[in-house]
Amino acid sequence: MFFFFVGGVEQGAGRVLKEAAGRCLRCGGTADLVETEKALKLFFVPVWRWPGKDPAYLCRECGLLAPGSLGAEPGPSLLPREARCGACSRAVDPQFRFCPFCGSAL
Ligand SMILES: [Zn+2]
Ligand SMILES: [Zn+2]
């Protein structure tokens, strides 16, 4: 049963989006970020429900498939923290050292 389950997940998991992108929630092993469209169908009793196009983390060590939102944050989807100018309160790029609108030092 266990081996059947693991084999099913490996077959069903979509292509790897990013290798070693996160860590397994259960064993702490290296997990790849994979597409989940096909993998969802392999669960007889789905533990999680999430949109099929969302990526998930597939553990290389124990085969655990976890929704991406529960694993380590995928870097590209994290927006840089919004910065605002202290003088004019307009949103500015956090990397700027001076406000492009009013010229104040940030
Ligand atoms: Zn694991
Ligand atoms: Zn400003």
Image (spheres, rainbow, N blue to C red):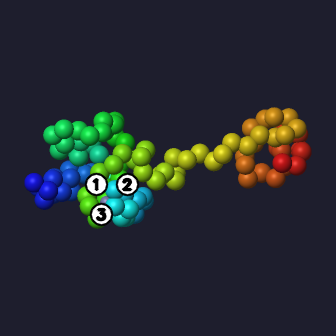
Instruction: Depth check: give the residue in front, 20 or 30.
Output: 30
Asked if marks 1 and 3 touch (Cβ < 8 Å), the reply is no
For this view, does 79 lie left or right of residue 5?
right
Tag 3: residue type? Arg
Between marks 2 and 3 in the image, the one whose residue lies nearer the viewer? 2
SS at circle 3:
loop
Task: Please name the residue that numbered disc 3 is placed on.
Answer: 60
Residue 11 seen: no
**Callout 2: few (<14), some (14-19), or many (20+) C-alpha neighbours within 10 Å?**
some
Q: Distance between the residues labelled 1 and 3?
A: 8 Å
Task: Please name the residue that numbered disc 2 is placed on.
Answer: 25
Residue at disc 1, CB closer than 8 Å to ligand 1: yes
**Callout 1: few (<14), some (14-19), or many (20+) C-alpha neighbours within 10 Å?**
some
Could you tell which of marks 2 and 3 lies nearer the N-terminus? 2
Which quadrant: the N terminus? bottom left
Residue at position x 30%, y 39% from top? 48
Residue at disc 2, CB closer than 8 Å to ligand 1: yes
| Figure quadrant of residue 88 | top right
Asked if marks 1 and 2 touch (Cβ < 8 Å), the reply is yes
Could you tell which of marks 1 and 2 lies nearer the N-terminus? 2
Q: Distance between the residues labelled 1 and 2?
A: 8 Å
Tag 2: residue type? Leu
Residue at disc 3, CB closer than 8 Å to ligand 1: yes
Q: Is residue 57 above or below residue 19?
A: above
Task: Please name the residue that numbered disc 1 is placed on.
Answer: 64
